[in-house]
Structure formats: C-alpha cells, structure tokens
Image (cartoon, rainbow, N blue to C red):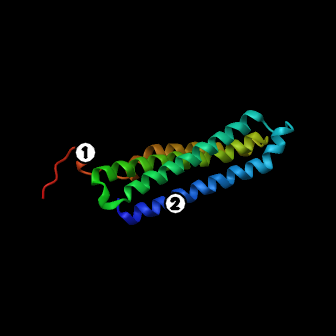
Amino acid sequence: MGDDLAASNVNRSYSLAATSIAIFTFMLIFLYPKFASGEISAILFQATLVVMGLATFSFVFASFYYYGSSLGSRIDDAERAVYSRRGDRFWLLGYTLLFLDPSLILFSVGLHVVGSAWFALWLVYVLFVIRYFPRVQSAPSASSRGEVREH
C-alpha cells in the first residue's frame, strides 16, 4: 500500500470513528430518556450501544494499523502489508457494525417492519462482503507469502 493511500485510509477510518461517536451521543441524548421510562426495548437499546462501541473501536484500530502501514521506510514491506490487511479487516468490521445499527435502533423503538427491511438489506450487504471482500482487501507482499524477490 502506498503512503498516500495509507494516509487517506487513516483519515477515513478516523472520520468514521468520530461519526460513530457522534451517533452514539445522539442515541444517548434522544433515546436514553425513552429507555429510562421503559418506552423502548431495554435489551435492544443496550445491544445498539454495544454495537456502536464495537464499530467505533474497530475504526480506531483500523486507523492505528493504517497509520502503521504508512510509516514508509521505518518498516519493511512485509510488515506494511500485514498492517494494511489488519486495517482492512478492522475497517470492514466497523463498517459492517455501523450498518447494523439502524436496524437495531428501529427495532428498539418498535418499528419492526422498517427494522426488518433495514436488517434484510444488512444481510444482503454481509453476503456481498463475504463474496467480494477477499478480492478487494490489501494484497500480501511477496515476502509475507514466503516468495523470494529477485533483484
């Protein structure tokens, strides 16, 4: 992964982590009073907060690994590739959980039909990712696959 791409990935992951924190705060401000009064499902509300926490920290870890892959000459190509692939996986986990959150919110406030539609779309996304993510994630370097490079 090139330094520019790695730096861009750091910025994207960092921005998504900040967005996740904003959504988390928004949910607390608007939904916690409903939770406290028993108007919404307690289990679903808490599950939604857990999912947002996992998504946020996945983006933070992705930022860390993408930053590591942007260190240039400080680390070798094999280590850069490992960091990049880990960053890809954490980013994917965060993004997948971030897309799950709307359906959980809709279920927790009692909008089951709309929540089911969102959940069905999330499942389609998960199937799409299972099929195509291995093709688009960062490729391992030749040295990390055990191949010998010729000079």
How far apart are the alpha carbons under marks 2 and 1? 28 Å
Dot 2 or dot 1, earlier in sequence:
2
Q: Which residue is the extreme one toward the top?
A: 43
Q: Quadrant of the C terminus?
A: bottom left
Residue at figure coordinates x 53%, y 51% from the top left: 59
Using residue 83 as the reference point, say whether residue 35 is left or right of it: right
Label 1: element kind: helix
Q: Which residue is the extreme one toward the bottom?
A: 4
Residue 136 at what x, y percent from top left?
40, 53
Identify the image quadrant of residue 107: top right
Tell me if residue 43 comes above or below residue 150 in the rendering.
above
Q: Which residue is mark 2?
A: 12
Q: Which residue is mark 1?
A: 145
Tell me if residue 44 comes above or below residue 89 in the rendering.
above
Label 2: element kind: helix
Amino acid carrying mark 1 in the image: Arg
Using residue 95 as the reference point, say whether residue 145 is left or right of it: left
Q: Which residue is the extreme one toward the right?
A: 37
Residue at figure coordinates x 54%, y 57% from the top left: 14
Using residue 61 as the reference point, say whether residue 46 is left or right of it: right
